[in-house]
Image (cartoon, coloured by chain):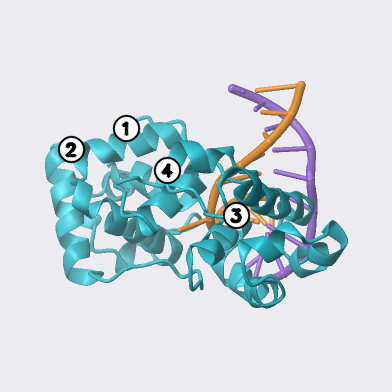
Chain colours: A cyan, B orange, C purple
Amino acid sequence: MTKKERFAFVISYFEQHAPNAETELIYDNPYQLLVAVILSAQCTDKRVNLTTPAIFERYPDVEALSHATFEELFPLIRSISYPNNKTKHLIGMAQMVIDDFNGEIPATVPELIKLPGVGRKTANVITSVVHQQPNMAVDTHVFRVSARIGLTTNAKTPLQTELQLLKYIPKEKVYIAHHWLILHGRYICIARNPKCGECGLRPACKYYQQITKAQ
DNA sequence: ATCCCGAGGG
DNA sequence: CCCTCTGGAT
C-alpha cells in the first residue's frame, strides 16, 4: 500500500465513522479556547474542563486576566500539571495581548507564538479552529497515531509530523483530520495497549501489520 | 511506572 | 539536541 493509498483509506474511514469530530475542550470564544489550550499541555482535556469554569468566571475576558495576580490565579490552576508555569504564562499572555495586540488575540501563527505559553502546537490549534487556516497541530496523540499507522515515516519531532501530514491531507480536511487523529488516539489507538481489535484502520495500519506478522 | 491536545530555556 | 516544569489518572 502506497502512502497515498494509506491516507486515502484513513480519510475515507474517518469521514464515514467520525464526520463531526471536534475538540472536547469546553469554550465559548477565542479567549477561552486559548486559555484552555495553554492549560492542556501534558494534561487531559477532562481535567482542563474541570478548572476552566472558575477561571472564566473570575476572569471573563483577556482584559480581566491581564490584571490577575499570581496569588489569585495559582489556586485555580493548582490541580493541573505545571501550575507554576501556566499561571505565569496565562497572565503574561493576557498582558501581551493587551499591550502589543490591542486586546485582540492574534490570528497568525508567528504572532501567536510570541505570546507566553503559546508554542507551535497551540498556535496551530487557534488558527485552525478560530480562523479556518489549514494548519495541523501535532500533539502527543497526532504524533503517535500518525507514526503507528504509517502516515508519517521516521518523524522524530512534531514539526516533521506536521509537514508530512500536510503533504498528503487536502487543505480543507486538515482541521477535521486533526480531530480525527486526536480522538482516535484518545479512545482507540491509546499509548499503552492500543485497542486494535476495535480499530477500523487495521487494513491500512503498519503497526497492526507488524504485530500480526510477529505472531 | 507511564501517560495526558507542550513550552521555554540551555 | 537536551533538560525541567509538575498533578492526577490508570
- Residue A128: x, y in percent? 36, 53
Q: Mark 1 points at which residue?
A: A153
- Mark 4 in CB contact with mark 3 (< 8 angstroms): no
Residue topped by disc 3: A38
Q: Residue at x 48, y 68 (%)?
A: A29
Q: What element carries label 4?
A: loop
Quadrant for residue A94, please give it: bottom right
Label 1: few (<14), some (14–19) or many (≥20) C-alpha neighbours in 10 Å = some
Q: Is residue A215 left or right of residue C5?
A: left
Q: Distance between the residues labelled 1 and 2?
A: 10 Å
Residue type beneath disc 2: Lys
Kind of residue at disc 1: Thr
Amino acid beneath label 4: Thr
Q: Name the residue under label 2.
A: A3
Residue of label 4: A108
Picture quadrant of residue A162: top left
Same chain shared by disc 4 and disc 1: yes
The residue depicted at 26 percent of the width and 49 percent of the height is: A205
Q: Which circle's residue, 3 or 1, is located before the other in the chain?
A: 3
- Contact between labelled residues 2 and 4, with CB atoms less than 8 Å apart: no
